[in-house]
Image (cartoon, rainbow, N blue to C red):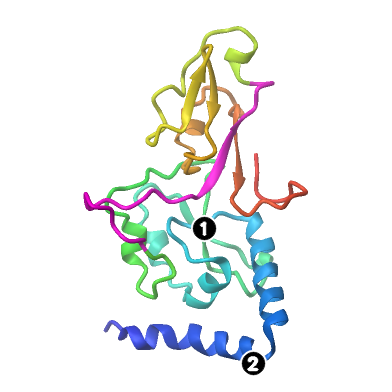
Amino acid sequence: MDKPESEKLDRRGFFRQALRKTGRSVVEHVETRARERAAHWIRPPFALDELEFLLACTRCGDCVTACPHQVIFPLPARLGAQVVGTPAMDLLHKSCHLCGEWPCVGACEPGALNLPEQRDDGSVPPPRLALAWIDTAACLPYSGPECGACAGSCPVGALEWRREKPRVNPQVCTGCMLCRDACILKPPAIGIKTMHTNPSGEGASA
């Protein structure tokens, strides 16, 4: 039986209240540490901020099961008790199809994945999962040969072409990695960075 909304918030509220009692500096440290660790994985669409996500997620696995393209997987135990079993996306080897009905979000009963407000036309703004980038040393058009395998693969128009060479508009890119899926090279000439990549460059990237 579904829990009432008040009960869903109890766990998050309890930990939030406990953190606040320890002082703002402690809360900020915990939040910063959570964001730093999040540089090593990519959460499913419309995930809450990392600390809120960890407090809300029950590790039920429903979003993993709901993903029709098997992109979502539970993080392994070697990453630590705080995150083991929480969902992440394998965008290095697969791509998010930005499903119109967002089945992973719909399956998340605790609200760790939470759709934003709808636009006037009933749609929702696309999520920012990660950031794609072009490896110009590997991408064929940058060395002369024609390719265009990734042309038309981006559902949001973030992949732009200048002088027959592709580039990613970081202001538009969702990080779905459909362009990477379309690349004919092995490994692909399109890499990925998480939205939480540290200034030093550390984090999940390829």
Q: Is residue 99 left or right of residue 138?
A: left
Q: Quadrant of residue 6?
A: bottom left
Is label 2 in a helix, a strand or a loop?
A: helix
Q: Residue at x 49, y 38 (%)?
A: 177
Name the residue rendered at 68%, 75% in the picture: 28
Q: Amino acid at mark 2?
A: Lys
Measured as percent of width and height from the top left, residue 149 is found at 46, 19
Please name whichever residue, 64 or 99, is drawn nearer the observer in this view of the structure. 99
Is residue 77 highlighted in magenta? no
Quarter of the picture containing the N terminus is: bottom left
Q: Quadrant of the C terminus?
A: top right
Describe the element under mark 1 as helix, strand or loop.
Answer: loop
**Is residue 133 shown above or below 112?**
above
Q: Earlier in the sequence, mark 2 or mark 1?
A: 2
Provide the residue designation for mark 1.
Answer: 43
Mark seen at residue 21: 2
Left or right of 39? Residue 13 is: left
Residue 129 magenta-drawn?
A: yes
Magenta range: 115-138
